[in-house]
Image (cartoon, coloured by chain):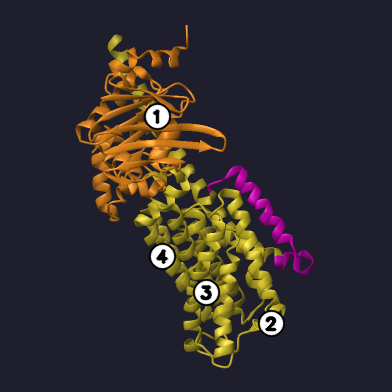
Chain colours: A yellow, B orange
Amino acid sequence: MKNYHFAIFTLVAALLLPAVIDSSHLNMAILVLMAAQVGVAWNMVGGYAGQVSLGHAAFYGIGAYASTLLLVKFGVNPWIGVLTGGVVAALLSLAFGWSCFRLKGHYFAMATIAVAELVQIFFTEWEYGGAAVGLYVPLDKPGWLWMSFSTKLPYYWLALGLLLLTLAANWWIERSYLGYYFRAIKDEPDAARSIGINIARYKQIALSVSAFFTAIGGSLYAQKEIYIDPNSVLSTALSIKMALVAILGGVGTLFGPVIGAVILTSIEEFTRIFFGGTGRGTDVIIYASLIIVIAVFYPTGIIGWMRSFRERRAARADASRQIAAHAASASTNNGEAA
Amino acid sequence: MSLLEVHQVSKRFGGLTANQDVSFNVDAGQVVGLIGPNGAGKTTLFNCVAGYFAPSAGSIMLSGRNIAGLPPEACAKAGVARTFQVARTFGSMTACENVMTAAMLLQHNVARARVAALQWLAFVNLERFADKPAASMTISEQRRLAVARALAIQPSILLMDEVMAGLNPSEVRLAVDVVLKIRDSGIACLIVEHVLEGIMPIADKIVVLDRGVKIAEGTPQQVSNDPHVITAYLGDE
């Protein structure tokens, strides 16, 4: 129940936030929300189902390119483009899953890197899609209808809305039979098969849903930044960041990626402000250090660490209560003996 | 027609023949023990029936349908449940959630799966562990949990791989009680076992494998007096 109080408190804070901060901080808040959203989307397949993908930038990029190309080349409304991008990514995830799910564990992760690299190379070479130069999103029709704004605030609401939608999808999955199947596949794939779970099918469902929401995140990025190129929406560093957001906060937990996103985005922005142009790559060094710290000390992430802390405290309280009760009964016994 | 008819099953791994033309039947509600010395091919045969290996030759009929070569999840849907040598419980779940996940094969509704799961936990006397993490239970309890999980898919036959290995005598008695209870509820049991004291008193039939070949089949009394079996276990004089 305390978790729900915390969630409601955070939501109210998020709703009030734009009223109290200036526009540069608002931009950072949007970055946090967008990082959290892709982390939550990644968590469906990487966290719950335990299939650690390091190629999710492929879906992000496909979403960004789909909505932008539809808008630039065919004048399709971005709202339709965003949904189309999600559906295209979910369909392409079938090929992604077909090629990668033959492998398990680390080998799966390596295959996802390779597939994402192929997608990035394709977009870098594809003249029609802007190649290495990238694409600009036209700004000629401002307003909600064309999802195009000259101020930051509407993007904040869009990012918040999308994050809530993605969280709601995860919340529903976590509680449905899908959530149980995903955890079973993660824990013991052979035992999962023995109780009739078609693990190939359910891994693919997790991946497709995850790809859908990741792509929508990519489309939103394109609309907000009004410029995309293969490096900004398809890089391996981006894939790793998506995974790291979830792993840092706590894999397979609903709010873990949100916490991870707050911390990771803060580090990123802080190093950028602090080191400026000379510090290029500093954030990567910090990422790497974080991965090592998580792997060695807190493999269950911040949420897992907080849970075990709470459990240890409860166990200690329980033990001291027992000792006290024991001491009390011992003293009464002594009293009787005397 | 028997419930399970294993007919002329062979399994080869490259040049190694793990099973050669093995045939036997399991009738509905029967307890059949599959025994043999180390390396006899018991677990290979077991995995063929459960769908984890595809036999190189032969057929495996369950209620008249050939399930040989079907993947494990299809075998499970056809009515074959199994347990593993190590319990392989879902470590991130509670005992009840473990069984619920299996009960979801029949219906995806979570609340109804929980009702069914609690019944199966009571069946193996683990209802008091329902909301405890599976990982916190003892080996013996986890094995019984795995049995409850396997039963929750409502199979016609349950395959058990060494349910009694490594248990102390009182735990063996608990495991035996569970097997008898399963038989009494009309589910056939095929048990691969090393602990002969556990399996001999409860089996309706024993099938003995040695070096991949069936060397004897019959009541526990018959096979324990069979000279081939004695030779296989104890060696020649």
User: Which of the two labelled residues, at mark 2 and mark 3, occupies the earlier sequence position?
Assistant: 3
Point 56% across, 69% down: residue: A59
Mark 1 secondary-structure assignment: loop
Give the distance between the C-alpha atoms of the residues marked 2 and 4, in whole angstroms. 36 Å
Earlier sequence position, callout 4 versus callout 3: 3
Question: What segment is highlighted magenta in the picture?
Answer: A272-300
Residue B5 point in image, percent of width and height: 31, 37
Question: Mark 1 belongs to which amino acid?
Answer: Thr
Q: Mark 2 points at which residue?
A: A127
Q: Residue at x 43, y 66 (%)?
A: A11
Q: Report the disc number at residue A169.
A: 4
Evaluate whether label 2 is on the same chain as label 3: yes
Label 2: state its secondary structure: loop
Q: Name the residue under label 1.
A: B138
Asked if marks 4 and 3 fall on the same chain, the answer is yes
Q: Which residue corresponds to mark 3?
A: A20
Q: Quick check: marks 1 and 3 in contact, CB under 8 Å?
A: no
Q: How far apart are marks 1 and 3 (CA)?
A: 54 Å
The answer to whether the residue labelled 2 contacts the one labelled 1, judged by CB atoms less than 8 Å apart, is no
Residue at (64% x, 52% y) in the render = A290
Residue B194 drawn in magenta: no
Instruction: Residue B80: tell me if it is visible.
Output: yes
Q: Residue A336: where, in percent of width, then height?
A: 27, 12
Q: Do pointers 2 and 1 mark residues of a single chain?
A: no
Q: Does the magenta stretch include residue A290?
A: yes
Q: Earlier in the sequence, mark 2 or mark 4?
A: 2
* Magenta stretch, main secondary structure class: helix
